[in-house]
């Protein structure tokens, strides 16, 4: 099990790496300089997707035993998406606890492993925005719209994108 000091050292290194070598598509930093376990992330809506042009803010909260357990990611910007709960929490396989899925939807290999970094997590979220998984949705209503009423889905996402631009 990672001790808090191991988690702290790892998060410090990942923050330093992202500051030295920024990654296209997002920015990340600490919410409060005194707390390495809570990060603020801004994801730029991926080009050629419904989210293109948006600036979506999220909070990434790391557990004390990181990297053995995954962080949680919650959008603070409004995001209409099958894999984002109505409260903003992101639902993707790599953020699920390691091991076998009690519901049988995911392979253990698709779930959290300690090799993931802030960068790999955010890139997975960007990929999620590009390709929703409506097979096991966090937001059932968004998934139904995505499948059955694409134009309504597009309009709601467009409103989220415009709202995110107004906040910037």
Image (cartoon, rainbow, N blue to C red):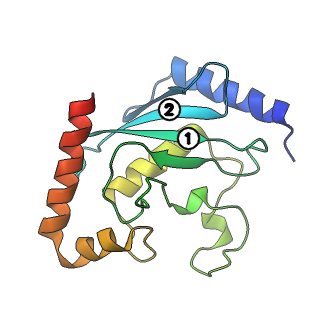
Q: Which mark is residue 60?
A: 1
Residue nearer the viewer, 91 or 89: 89
**Residue 65 spot, x, y in % from top left:** 79, 44
Tell me whether the residue at label 2 lies in contact with that at label 1, contact meaning CB atoms closer than 8 angstroms: yes
**Residue 132 spot, x, y in % from top left:** 35, 64
For the question of whether residue 52 can be seen, the reply is: no
**Residue 122 spot, x, y in % from top left:** 48, 43
Q: Residue at horizontal 50%, vertical 32%?
A: 40
Q: Quadrant of residue 11?
A: top right
> Residue farthest to the front?
87
Q: Residue at horizontal 87%, vertical 48%?
A: 1
Q: Residues within 10 Å of mark 2 (few under 14, many from 20)?
A: some
Q: Quadrant of residue 47?
A: top left
Q: Quadrant of residue 146?
A: bottom left
User: Considering only order in the chain, which callout, 1 or 2, is on the residue closer to the N terminus?
Assistant: 2
Q: Secondary structure at mark 1?
A: strand
| Residue at mark 2 | 40
Q: Is residue 89 left or right of residue 65?
A: left
Q: Which mark is residue 138?
A: none
Measured along the vertical axis of the image, is residue 160 above or below residue 5? Answer: below
Give me the C-alpha separation between circle 2 and circle 1: 6 Å
């Amino acid at each position: 099990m990672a001790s808090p000091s191991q988690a702290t050292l790892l998060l410090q290194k990942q923050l330093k790496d992202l500051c030295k070598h920024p990654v296209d598509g997002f920015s990340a930093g600490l919410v409060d300089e005194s707390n390495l376990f809570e990060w603020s992330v801004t994801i730029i809506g991926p080009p050629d997707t419904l989210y293109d042009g948006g600036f979506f803010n999220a909070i990434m909260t790391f557990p004390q035993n990181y990297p053995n357990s995954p962080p949680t990611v919650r959008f603070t910007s409004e995001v209409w998406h099958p894999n984002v709960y109505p409260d903003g929490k992101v639902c993707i396989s790599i953020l699920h606890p390691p091991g076998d899925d009690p519901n049988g939807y995911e392979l253990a290999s698709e779930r959290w492993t300690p090799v993931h970094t802030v960068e790999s997590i955010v890139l997975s979220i960007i990929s999620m925005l590009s390709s929703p998984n409506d097979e096991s949705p966090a937001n059932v209503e968004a998934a139904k719209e995505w499948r059955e009423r694409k134009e309504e889905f597009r309009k709601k996402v467009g409103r989220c994108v415009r709202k995110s631009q107004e906040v910037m």
